[in-house]
Image (cartoon, rainbow, N blue to C red):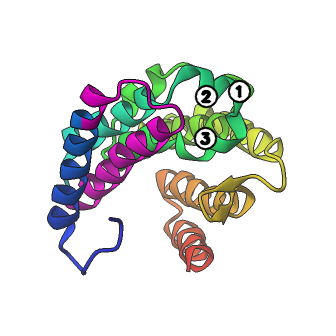
Amino acid sequence: LMVVERGRWWLRGEGNEKAIEADRKYREISPRQGFYAIYMAHNHQFLSWVCMMDGRREKSIREARTMIAGVPKEFIEKSPAAIDGYLPIAYEALVRYGRWDEILKEPEPPATLPILTAFWRLSRALAFAAKGQLDDAVKEQAAFREAAAKIPPDAKMAINKAKDVMALADHVLEGEIAFARGETDAAVRHLREAATLED
């Protein structure tokens, strides 16, 4: 469902909404889902991402939170490494739409979720930079780097190595802090490096 033709995000959104509705009906027939509950939550993650790309702020944030709420707590406790890389979706949606004050109210994740913790620190640093609170941004940047260093080297975020994603994120953050300082050339250099890493 994530494969899209250029610019036709609304079509993928419809597909994910149909999948969510099909899962709702299935739950009525078979309330106990076990591992399939993770796949059902994944539909909300897809929809959140599609809405991010399509400019639908409220729906994107709502679906991200629905995705996280849909992952059984016992699964997170028993298999944190398996789900850790998928849980930052809410931070991604909040950052995408510049919901800085909401980000700064988010509670710290448990230590058992190192990827989520690093993204929490990252989003806080981005929020402080955007708000012009540069001392706080730099402190959170250091905390982000410390949190990213604690991620196991083999940890994945879907098909990507978490360490690679964190290296990209580090350049984005460095660029945003530089931009907030008025250092445009440095900001562009770091953001281009992030784009190169993403490619």
Reading the chain from its start, which is encountered first: label 3 or label 1? Answer: 1
Q: Which residue is mark 3?
A: 83
- Determine which of the numbered discs, if any, sits on residue 75 in the image: 2
Residue 101 is left or right of residue 198, and the answer is left
Magenta region, main secondary structure: helix
Q: Nearer the viewer, residue 51 or 108?
A: 51
Say few, some or many: other residues with alpha carbon within 10 Å of mark 2 (under 14 / 14 to 19 / 20 or more).
some
C-alpha separation, residue under disc 3 versus residue under disc 1:
10 Å
**Residue shown at 84%/55% (left/top)?**
153
Residue 110 location, quadrant:
top right
Q: Nearer the viewer, residue 182 or 61?
A: 61
**Residue shown at 48%/22% (left/top)?**
106
Q: Which element is circle 2 on?
A: helix
Question: Which kind of residue does numbered mark 1 sit on?
Answer: Lys
Q: Which quadrant does the C terminus fall into?
A: bottom right
Residue 110 is left or right of residue 31, and the answer is right
Question: Which kind of residue does numbered mark 2 sit on?
Answer: Phe
C-alpha separation, residue under disc 1 versus residue under disc 2:
5 Å
Q: Which residue is mark 1?
A: 78
- Are the two marked residues, 1 and 2, in contact with CB atoms closer than 8 angstroms? yes
- Are the two marked residues, 2 and 3, in contact with CB atoms closer than 8 angstroms? yes
- Locate residue 97, reporting x and y percent: 30, 45
Per the rendered image, the range of residues in magenta is 26-54
Say few, some or many: other residues with alpha carbon within 10 Å of mark 3 (under 14 / 14 to 19 / 20 or more).
many
Residue 46 to residue 82: above or below? below
- Locate residue 10, reporting x and y percent: 15, 63
Say few, some or many: other residues with alpha carbon within 10 Å of mark 1 (under 14 / 14 to 19 / 20 or more).
few
In front: label 3 or label 1: 1
Reading the chain from its start, which is encountered first: label 2 or label 3? Answer: 2
C-alpha separation, residue under disc 2 versus residue under disc 3:
8 Å
Q: Which element is circle 3 on?
A: helix
**Residue shown at 28%/61% (left/top)?**
53
